[in-house]
Image (cartoon, coloured by chain):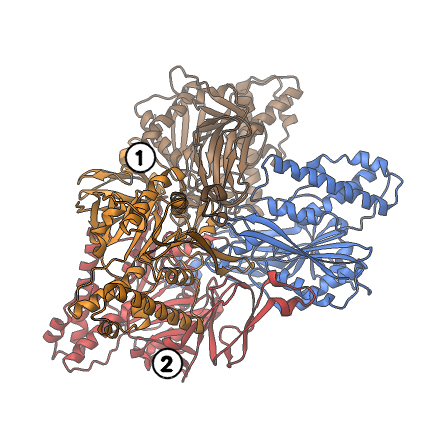
Chain colours: A brown, B blue, C orange, D red
């Protein structure tokens, strides 16, 4: 049982440096393959601490199957600085969000699922899975070769294509992100909601089994399509491939002590997958559906005093933030004249907060979970 | 016949300044309404010169109908500087392209087109149009009120909603843009391809009658939906509402002398619409379909010597650009050792070029029309 | 006793909006004039909370003399966003630090101090002060008029000239700033070190009585020059004009609750100046000389786990931060292989810290006070 | 006679990539050493074309002495993109101009020039030069070692220190830059004004023999100090070490065809230095003193139509540019109501122009030479 390290070039800069990513793979015999990547958004670096802690935890452990770890998965996004902060969420040239350019490969490649399902109608699930992975891999290669032939590999999709291809054969895909100023929370698709309790997050955002361009979705969509195609044939598939986005707190932050706690999520999932020995625990998280996950946009511009912090629970009528507008000050009555308080119109939990108190009208102030359930 | 000027606040800054847009409307009796806006992308300022030249040309002229002109339609996009250049294509906070957040209002509002068409089955087209505009306006108000109630007016859509609502009743919508380093060209939907020759552009890019978020599409989609709905009832509608995106050369450029020529496009269209008296001319442009409009991405990083300029026609095998990579230099054979030439693999016309010769792998180098026809 | 409000235009944007600042002045009879401004660096907004709290504290109070308050003193710096953060320390077009373009007016204007001192050799200090302020004001007007005539008012100095002229007649000048991620501390010139204890800060950075372009220096330099000129004539002047930079914590932060504490500094200073009635308190701060104020630059690039926070005291040999370099990971020994710990080579107090853990070689990691004394 | 290539690491990124520069040195026997570097400002890339053309021209040529070429001398500055443009003039983290952090090493190191000159009073100039270079090199090493010991090597000075040290022993230092939108021109110190005609530029800007932080100045200051120190001893030194900044047109531009012409400047200088055989030519440039080199700042904000281009000569009273302010439009009289024309108040030559027509009040519009002479 030993590590394999690969260096994969991802982008040649005008200056000649070739940015690359490293994949660290640990394998032992048959078993599930787990793919874990961090920092696709360049400022979201805590996942790298988690990966280091995971490597540390795996020392001397015996695994069953294989794990691929990709720290610093998008170096171009991480190296861009405007001032001291990292401009890592969007491509600095094109403005594109780095986590919206993955591909729904079954659709994009014109994969003939009906043909596949018909020919595997009576196969075991293990055989189906194995055969499907092979076919997916072929379809993906063909798809990317076409892009290359047509010179359609661009700034916005190259890193995504590379990462998605690396994750294609995995049985568990964990994409490690953070929010802006944020609490810890998990994106889980509806089909894996029951399993998500083993990720040990306190907040779970349940998203539809649909595609909107992100890595988690790109990784589970082939299996959703497969399940749907078999359903049409009357066979019910119980998927055992999961894909989650794990949000480990705030951007620009790298804390090894918090990494020690964060890694528990992943170690527990590895137990759940039988990659590590041991009984997985289950948490009792707060769930919220994507439709109940509300972004509050700044109703005006001004300086903002935030009254609630990520992780806080609030009630309808609670004060969330106060806007102060210096242009409106009446010095005889300074605070009342220039301030407006934003009040919650429903109960909820604060998940993300704008990292700045200097806010123009229309900027994202908060993202909150409402209609939470356990 | 006189001008009406309105000032519409569009965004309160944290500093208290409220950015606003001005609409200048000239009306005279019954007739079509033409909506013209410039600079939704902040660095694309030549349209403002065109609007000034248009106002100048309208002095002492008699029009039939009405024209609304909106220069500097997105002031927040225009005021952002990073260095001496304008960061105007994308929202500086969110990275979103300012011309991708309009709305397909018929779909978004759940407009009941079948009901509408059935009840107007035998109406005249003029009555249908008038009634449809009223209904669209109601649907749009309802839609935006819901957004407001749910605090979903954000940085990325507010200016788009305001502009789209202003253009809702128009019979001609002209959105004035520029490319990066670019020649002049026109976006025309398929349904208006025949009419597009009256816009007097030398290059016409023909896009599907579909929605992808841009102003021109958002403005013609209600009419496409209407035409389709009547087609199901067996009635063929000959649309006389047009929506074009006009690309007036390169960003960061403002030239009144070129504006004198650019405005001819619009004056001719106004004649075509009978808003101005006179016989419209027709050009003989090069057309290309969107599927034949190719973006060439940099296959490597380096310093780029461009061999073709926007507007140039080239043949398969022509040299388009040479990449030089300083890290690869062998001083005994300097140029050969570090250079790679990009050759055209089809005939075409250069439309846009990257404004910088300092290019990372994956950046957009050229946008070219292929399979052109006249 | 009432407030006077003035609106002063400071910059016309390309879009036509004219950014302005507001001055709020409260006066009552004879007495010192105090000038207080906030947010010359655009992300350093806590001073605005302090000004609001000060206005609130002044309600119903009787002052002796006058106070001018300028919140949001540099709106162009505050409105610039790159991502969610504010690009407010440097001019986005030119890169110039907004607090380095003030002027040493005595030198720049060629003020004849010898002549002035000779003609006021035997005047009272009050007469000297009054006459000097008048002469300074004339010199400043002449200086700025020359700049205007020569079209040398630029992006980088206009706001500074306006603010400096507003502060010219003041007996106390307080420039409210913040650090990046920072504790509260005070910049005090050597000549006012003894007085600085009345500002009630825990950390005082003692800078030379010299000019390096900042507001505090520009405001005290005329008095230093005057004192020096009289010293040559054998007369010792005990200056009673002070100029401080007050650093209220971290950028991007606006907290009214902390403002309640922060304003105590200013209220106490107003008592010290007899603008407010009451006995001023004195703190027992840690002092450090500018020469002992060390910036620690990142000796390498990597992800940084900070072990000390602003305000922390540390000892020689203490661990300050650990760098983790993902490219160096040996998965058999992950943490040891890729980490380097930075150890203090002297005792000190952390004042500022880089707000990001994503750090290139050479970036500022910490600013620390060493050789502190009380 | 062959090339030596060295790779010098200059900056470790957080992502682990180590940016490096390459030096290419050609030597042959005794003779002067020439140091040529390009792209210290990241967007100013034409110098790299010139270096390639120079290498090409040197093929099969015999030189006397040595030449060091450093293309892409500041890779961190070149790789930063905000949008498609390069943010290369200023450090993206600190805002510092990359060509203002060199050091006046004689002053900074406390070099004892009196002692040196006294001990070389009667030496030949060749001996003095040789000995001085050795001493400078020692002083520089000591200086940089102190910086390293004190952890004062930072983002803003590391690349400058490396480049300056590489150039320390040179007899000719050529720093290849460009302007924003610019004509070709040369910075020459007063002491080398007579020689500057051999650089074959049409425009020469004559700067004082003083230090303001730039590479050219840092490279000639040791020789100015030496000349001054010998002058005090009554010995007149005729300096034969030159240092120029060569401005090759506009930023973001890389043109090999123009490089063919640009390289003539350098080849001619090499002849003047006897590094290449042949008689150097002399041009008849327009000279202007730095005090007559005027920056025109935008007197208002607006969209700018430029009437003169870099390289143009204009007369007092000529129209230079017109500002158009969309907020001021009166549609009855559109152009007159919203435009203001800037008129030259002296004869001059346009050297630089702002690359954007979208201009806020206070931005640099033009840099012009006045009081030119030949």
Q: Nearer the viewer, residue B353 or B218?
A: B218
Total labels drawn: 2
Q: Residue furthest left?
A: D119
Q: Nearer the viewer, residue D181 or B109?
A: B109
Question: Which quadrant is the N terminus of chain B positioned in?
Answer: bottom right
Whether callout 2 and callout 1 share a subunit is answered: no
Return the x and y of residue D184 as percentages of the image width and height: 44, 73
Return the x and y of residue C79 as percentages of the image width and height: 47, 51
Q: Residues within 10 Å of mark 2 (few under 14, many from 20)?
A: many
Q: Nearer the viewer, residue A285 or A164?
A: A285
Q: Residue at x 53, y 44 (%)?
A: A361
Q: Left or right? Give the position of D369 relative to B199.
A: left
Return the x and y of residue A224 as percentages of the image width and height: 58, 26
Question: Which quadrant is the C terminus of chain B positioned in?
Answer: bottom right
Mark yes or no: residue C68 visible.
Answer: yes
Which label was assigned to residue D197?
Answer: 2
Q: Left or right? Give the position of B210 relative to C189.
A: right
Q: Secondary structure at mark 2?
A: helix
Q: Residues within 10 Å of mark 1 (few under 14, many from 20)?
A: some
User: Relative to residue D113, is residue A134 depicted above or below?
Assistant: above
Q: Nearer the viewer, residue A324 or B276?
A: A324
Q: Residue at x 31, y 61 (%)?
A: C218
Q: Residue at x 33, y 27 (%)?
A: A260
Residue at mark 1: chain: C
User: Relative to residue A173, is residue C86 depicted above or below?
Assistant: below
Which label was assigned to residue C330?
Answer: 1
């Amino acid at each position: 049982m030993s590590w394999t390290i690969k260096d994969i070039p991802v982008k040649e800069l005008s200056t000649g440096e070739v940015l690359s990513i490293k994949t660290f793979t640990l394998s032992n015999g048959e078993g599930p393959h787990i793919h874990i990547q961090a920092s696709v958004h360049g400022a979201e670096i805590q996942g790298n601490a988690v990966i280091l802690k995971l490597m540390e935890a795996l020392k001397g452990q015996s695994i069953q199957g294989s794990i691929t770890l990709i720290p610093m998965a998008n170096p171009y996004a991480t190296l861009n600085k405007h001032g001291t902060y990292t401009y890592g969420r969007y491509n600095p040239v094109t403005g594109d969000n780095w986590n919206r350019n993955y591909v729904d490969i079954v659709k994009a490649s014109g994969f003939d699922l009906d043909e596949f399902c018909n020919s595997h109608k009576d196969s075991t699930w293990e055989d189906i899975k194995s055969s499907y992975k092979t076919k997916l891999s072929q379809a993906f290669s063909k798809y990317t070769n076409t892009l290359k032939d047509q010179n359609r590999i661009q700034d916005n999709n190259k890193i995504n294509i590379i990462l998605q291809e690396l994750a294609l054969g995995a049985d568990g895909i964990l994409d490690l992100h953070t929010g802006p100023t944020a609490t810890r929370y998990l994106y889980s698709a509806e089909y894996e909601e029951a399993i998500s309790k083993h990720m040990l997050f306190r907040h779970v955002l349940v998203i539809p089994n649909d595609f909107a361009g992100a890595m988690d979705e790109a990784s589970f969509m082939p299996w959703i399509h497969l399940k749907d195609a078999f359903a049409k044939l009357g066979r019910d598939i119980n998927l055992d491939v999961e894909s989650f986005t794990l949000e480990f707190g705030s951007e620009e932050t790298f804390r090894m002590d918090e990494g020690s706690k964060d890694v528990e999520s992943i170690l527990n999932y590895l137990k759940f997958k039988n990659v590590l020995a041991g009984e997985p625990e289950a948490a009792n998280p707060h769930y919220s559906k994507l439709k109940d996950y509300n972004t509050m946009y700044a109703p005006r511009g001004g300086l903002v005093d935030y009254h609630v912090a990520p992780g806080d629970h609030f009630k309808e009528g609670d004060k969330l933030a106060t806007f102060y507008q210096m242009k409106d000050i009446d010095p005889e009555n300074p605070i009342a004249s220039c301030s407006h308080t934003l009040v919650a119109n429903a109960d909820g939990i604060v998940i993300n907060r704008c990292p700045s108190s200097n806010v123009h009208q229309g900027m994202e102030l908060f993202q909150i979970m409402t209609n939470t359930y356990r």
